[in-house]
Image (tube, grey):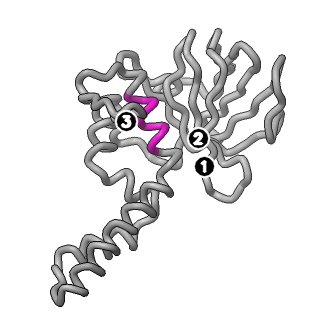
Amino acid sequence: MDIEGTAHRLEDMTPGYRVNVLAWLDANAAYFHAMTIRKHLIEVYAELLDGRVDPLALRRLHHILASGPEQWLAATAIVQALKDAVGERGTSANQPRTVHPRRPPLGGPVPGVERLIITTENSRYDLDLRGGRVRRVPSTGARMRADSQWVPVRDVRPVEVGAPMAMRLDVRGDGVPTVRLTSPVIGVTTA
């Protein structure tokens, strides 16, 4: 469902739209996790007030509480279906990945490719596939936190010329991902 309340079936979404939905869900995992815990706590509390408790509801709540936001989100049916649709299943959350549903993964099993230079309208990104890090070198536009420094990258979404690139980075070094959406990509080369 989008911001206007319109429901979108998975099979009707474009590959880019699916990737955007995944990035949005990832960026808001902590919020959705907390709200799901809140919902289940309210339901269990209401059952306690009624003098009954469903053991299955308690198990579900325990499972949600025991998992972190990213782990919980990854186990949801919607995220699993979206990842299946864009070809992301089987990738490690701690390794950089680039996914495109119609082409082989960029930076994937390409012998000898360890670094990519991704040029956008405003910057250049050096993507170290082996080291799991990225460095932004601005050419124009606003400066960003950690510019020109190597930053750990959790994952990279589709890299497609003419479209923005989305990445999850550990900019602060605290393990909490920062989603960075670039200006449109104008070129990709190997280093």
Determine the main secondary structure of the stretch shown in magenta.
helix
Say if mark 2 contacts mark 1, CB within 8 Å.
Answer: yes
Residue type at mark 3 is Glu
Q: In this image, 171 relative to 149: left or right?
A: left
Circle 1 residues within 10 Å: few <14, some 14–19, many ≥20: some
Is residue 168 something one can see in this rendering?
yes
Mark sitting earlier along the chain (2/1): 2
Where 4 sits versus 79, above or below?
above
Q: Residue shown at 31%/23% (left/top)?
A: 13
Q: Residue shown at 41%/42% (left/top)?
A: 91
Magenta-highlighted residues: 18-25
Distance of label 2 from label 1 (alpha carbons)? 6 Å
Distance of label 1 from label 3 (alpha carbons)? 18 Å
Label disc, if present, on residue 177 of the rendered structure: 1
Quadrant of residue 3 in the image?
Answer: top left
Disc 2 designates what residue? Answer: 168
Q: Residue shown at 48%/37% (left/top)?
A: 23
Label disc, if present, on residue 117 of the rendered structure: none
